[in-house]
Amino acid sequence: MRKVVLGKSGLEVSAVGFGGIPIQRISVDEAVRVIRRALSLGVTFIDTAAGYSDSQQKVGAAIKGRRDGLVLASKSGAPTRDGLLRDVERSQQQMGVDVIDLYQLHSVSDRAGWERVSGPGGALEGLMEARDAGHVGHVGVTSHNLGLALEMIEHPAFETVQFPFNLVTSEPADELVPKVRELGLGFIVMKPLCGGQYDNARLAFKFLNGYPDLVPIPGIQRAEEIQEIVSLVESGETLRGDEKAEAAAIAAELGKLFCRRCGYCQPCPQGVAITMAMTFEGAAKRMPRDRLVKDWALHVAKVPDLCIECGECEEKCPYDLPIIETIKRTAELARDIMDAV
Ligand code: SF4
Ligand code: SF4
């Protein structure tokens, strides 16, 4: 498979990586089988996170005895130095490796969070310590907030950025992608299939093939999925005239519904976790049911009781999403899921 160098980290990875969210939903044996299938197809880059329940253990089980040539990435959402260092140690233990090639601050998506993690005693301090001690090879950041990402990537610590980019959320093409290139960072593409809200891999990857220096990490839970995606990436084919029109129509349609998780609509005066409710349908397809119920469904099901339809969030959403209507719909789904477990 074609290789891509992740900017100034110098890490050379396969042109498509393996995203470790959906393997939370499947058994260890299945996860090992899917990951090894990806490796056999030439995938050399695996991204997981301390926060993805047992994903790191499953990655560890799959790569046992086959670590050579792989680039492993993980991330931590711990806000403090100590929390970050604990997560790095846990990632090492769970994956059974001495060094994690790339470690990222996970989902830094609002200013207060960035000030906390980059301030004294914050997670970035711990991450630099972990790198200096040789526990992690390189340092990156992940985010859903475009304005903040544009700012954070100027921090000299970061060698890579991970951000959503797909045919629906293509806004990064305007400023973020050029700036990442200018600064010499690696760009890891989160949500190449719109976080589970879009399943036409052909158009999604032909769109991304137009950016061959970026590395998508689709979340995979079935061997057939990775096989199709690898073929599409290896083909190098980009959108043709009629496909461009098809993609534009899908982007226009889904773009009216797709939550970018940028967080601009928050906080809600009534305490609604709006982003969680807005992205619940996609999460329901990717997360294990028990975790979904524990972490998300309990809150999302209560949204209709909390929301007074003041409209403040819809005024703040730069994408004009129908937030009130959507969160009421996802609340019904959350209740159905809770009833079923
Ligand atoms: S409309 Fe509902 S969710 Fe939006 S800000 Fe008002 S109370 Fe919160
Ligand atoms: S609802 Fe709009 S403002 Fe809120 S997180 Fe989603 S895209 Fe961003």
Image: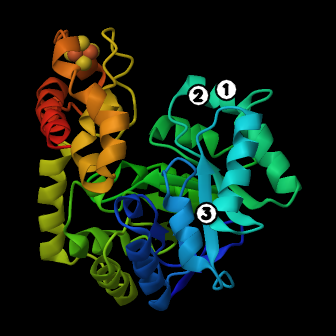
Label 3 crowd (10 A; few <14 / some 14-19 / many >=20) = many
User: Which corner quadrant of the image does residue 267 belong to?
Assistant: top left
Against 33, residue 196 (above or below) is: above
Q: Which is nearer the eye, 63 or 176?
A: 63
- State which mark lies toward you, 3 or 1: 3
Residue, disc 3: 73
Instruction: Give above or below for 282 relative to 319.
Output: below
Q: Which label sits in the foreground, 3 or 2? A: 3
Identify the image quadrant of the C terminus: top left
Tag 1, which secondary structure?
helix
Residue linked to disc 1? 116
**CA–CA distance between discs 3 and 1?**
23 Å
Which amino acid does the dot numbered 3 rest on? Ala
On the image, the x and y values in percent for residue 27 come to: 38, 67
Q: Residue at x 62, y 69 (%)?
A: 72
Q: Amino acid at mark 2?
A: Gly
Q: Mark 2 sits on what residue? A: 113
The residue sitting at 49% across, 69% down in the picture is 215
Does residue 11 appear left or right of residue 58 in this picture?
Answer: right
Name which residue type carries label 1. Answer: Arg
Report the residue at 75% width, 44% height from top: 85
The x, y position of residue 209, in whole percent, is 37, 75
